[in-house]
Image (cartoon, helix red, strand yellow):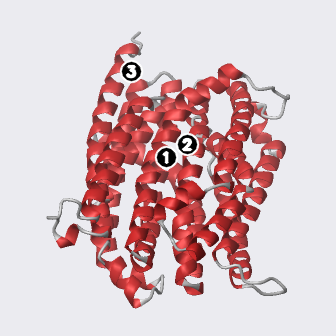
Amino acid sequence: MLANLKRDIPRLVSLAGPLLVGQLAVIAFGVMDTAMVARYSTEDLAALAISGSIFISIYVGLTGVVSALAPIAGQLFGAKRFAEIGEEVRQGWWLSIALSIVGMLILLYPQVFLSIAKASPEVEAKAVLYLQILAWGLPASMAMRVLVAFHNAVSRPTVITWLQIGGLFIKIPLNAWLIYGGFGVDAMGGPGCALATVIINWTWFIAAALIVYHDRFYHLFEVYKQFSWPDFHKIGTLLKLGLPIGFSYLIEVTSFAFMALFIARLGNASLAGHQIVANLGTVLYMLPLSLSIATSTLVAQSIGADRPTLAKEIGWSSLIFTTSVCVTVGILVWIFKYPLLDLYSPSEEVRKSAIALFLFIAFYQIFDALQVTSAFILRGYRVAFLPMWIYAVSLWGVGLGGGYLLGFNITGNIPEILQGAQGFWFANSMSLAIAAALLITLFKSTARKFEKEHPPITL
């Protein structure tokens, strides 16, 4: 095992490093949105929390479907079937167009989702405008996710990372201008950061598409060699893997998103405190997520190269390494909770609400690392249907359902420390632990099955 760790960790880190930097650049969008809008008004911050929860649920679910391209193209890359990858990219774009239409309709008419939060008319109006603006950036964002999956599959994530960093430098002045106003533009508050995001999304896609067209490295994949009409067999293959992945993403994100919608009933201070801690949790999640994406790439390439034992060993190496790193991060978060909270400059009422949640965000790091790594290992094997059901039962049933029972003291005998937002966070932590245990068990059985079906060749 030690030899495997020494072999696999450098490969994981070399791939995950650019992914992490890029993911952090993207997440910095949300951090800046939260921090800047918090300084504008508590009302706008509450609207951002509600609308952001709805948008991310829809966006992540849709992009999860498109992300099926990564393991499919990764296995083709491992098998050195390069030209076939270009066709998969073209079909991925067709799929992204169809999914964008669905997503735009939901974002343009989001009232049914907003009704869950029971927010004030002023907050709801700002949330509606925020979502309607973001709808016009969805086609570019979905098409870009196809290129992100393509770059991850061929072990070239650095290109996307540089684009994401560049977008961050554009986002900062755009946010300040549109949120607070100036130079002839009225202050937009929370919806201003949505408009800035739309501008960046279209800039990203156009730049990435041009790079793939001009850079000689991509010529062997023949992405632009010909025009392809929709191939329903290939799109069906993408959907067969992508729909369970997308639904798993949707379950995972909505377990947090509906927390925000329910916590909104506790008042703006509780919601704003939850938004700050959830925002920080999203930043921390980028570390195991980046390592997991790298793991999925290496596992898929190993499967494509007909080396199932190597795929299994990479999976175990990643589980050990990723979890160890995240436990360390959890300890540091607890130690430095007050300086971290100071970065958001919240009001005293919001600060008191947020500080009570830091124990949970530090505590669940180990379970989050285990579950996300196991899930991405399985996606490298192109196994996604059973993980979807594991997420549904654990995150929705135990996490969201249990959080509702605890948070609102439905039984009437819940300890005070587990009521309110704390109850939702505790139940979510327990649901991640259950999901992790079940996904690891599924990985073990899947790896054994692949090794039996593909025994090593002996001479």
Residue at coordinates 35% horizontally, 52% vertically from top-left? 369
Q: Are marks 2 and 1 in contact (CB under 8 Å)?
A: yes
Quadrant of image for the N terminus: top left
Lateral position of residue 10 relative to residue 188, left or right = left
Which label was assigned to residue 112? none
For disc 3, the neighbor class at 10 Å (few under 14, some 14 to 19, many from 20) is: some
Mark 2 or mark 3: which is in front? 2
Tell me: residue 419, above or below residue 366.
below
| Residue 7 shows in the view | no
In this rendered view, identify the residue nearer to me: 133 or 227: 133
Residue at the outermost bottom position = 348
| Residue 68 shows in the view | yes
In this rendered view, identify the residue nearer to me: 223 or 431: 431
Give the alpha-carbon distance from disc 1 to disc 3, as whole Å: 28 Å
Residue at coordinates 39% horizontally, 11% vertically from top-left? 458
Looking at the rendered structure, the secondary structure element under dot 3 is: helix
Which label was assigned to residue 250? 1
Mark nearer the N terminus (2 vs 3): 2
Residue to which mark 3 is pinned? 450
Quadrant of image for the C terminus: top left
Q: Amino acid at mark 1?
A: Leu
